Image: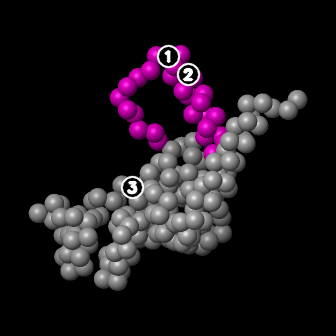
Amino acid sequence: MTEELDEVSLINLARTDPEAFGVLYERYVERIYNYVYFRVGNPNDAEDLTSKVFFKALKSIGGYKHMGLPFSAWLYRIAHNLVANYHRDRLRAKEISIENLTIPDTGRHPAPEQAIQQSEEMDFLLRIINDLSPQKRELVLLKFVQNLTNEEISYIFGKTEGAIKSLYHRTLLELRDRVKELENPRI
């Protein structure tokens, strides 16, 4: 029954019903784990941090205020802060390379020459994304892998939506310039 409730009703029910929170957990655990794993690069640490995200969410759900954003934006914000603490506590800024990001198989298999070209294009794209600053890489992850809106990303980063649009614009310009630079190297 709780699986059929809309998100706001489910959140309100989860304030007092652990089963309802379990439904929220099941809806979002995989997405949050993938986000955390991408940011920390270690499956054990990603599992620990993901469990901390949901523990903190469970503990704090009484104070959660629905502001028109999906519940997942709140979870991503918690995850973002925990990952920042993780890196700060370890005094290292190790990021997992986006090259290790798993792209889901669509079930459609291209011809061998097309597969080689797609692989080369993907390697090229991953190389230029890895050249971005950590914040811009995270923006690309949230925007294109997690498919979040600018509003959701602004909430996660703790910035205005305008600041995210500006960062997004600068990131795209940087990627465009880097593509031109790599396609037409100066001799």
Q: 169 or 158: which is nearer to us? A: 169
Amino acid, disc 3:
Arg
Mark 3 lies on a secondary structure that is helix
From the viewer's perspective, is 156 left or right of 4?
right
Amino acid, disc 2:
Ile
Label 1 and label 3: CA atoms lie apart by 32 Å
Q: 72 or 127: which is nearer to us? A: 72
Q: Earlier in the sequence, mark 2 or mark 3?
A: 3
Label at residue 116: 2
Quarter of the image holding residue 4?
bottom left
Category of crowding for the residue at label 2, using alpha-carbon neighbours closer than 10 angstroms: few (below 14), some (14–19), many (at least 20): few
Magenta stretch bounds: 102-130
Marks 1/2 in contact by CB < 8 Å: the verdict is yes
Locate the N terminus by quadrant: bottom left
Residue 61: x %, y % from top left: 32, 78
Amino acid, disc 1:
Pro
Residue of label 1: 112
Label at residue 31: 3
Q: 142 or 152: which is nearer to us? A: 152
Locate the C terminus by quadrant: top right
Quarter of the image holding residue 135?
bottom right
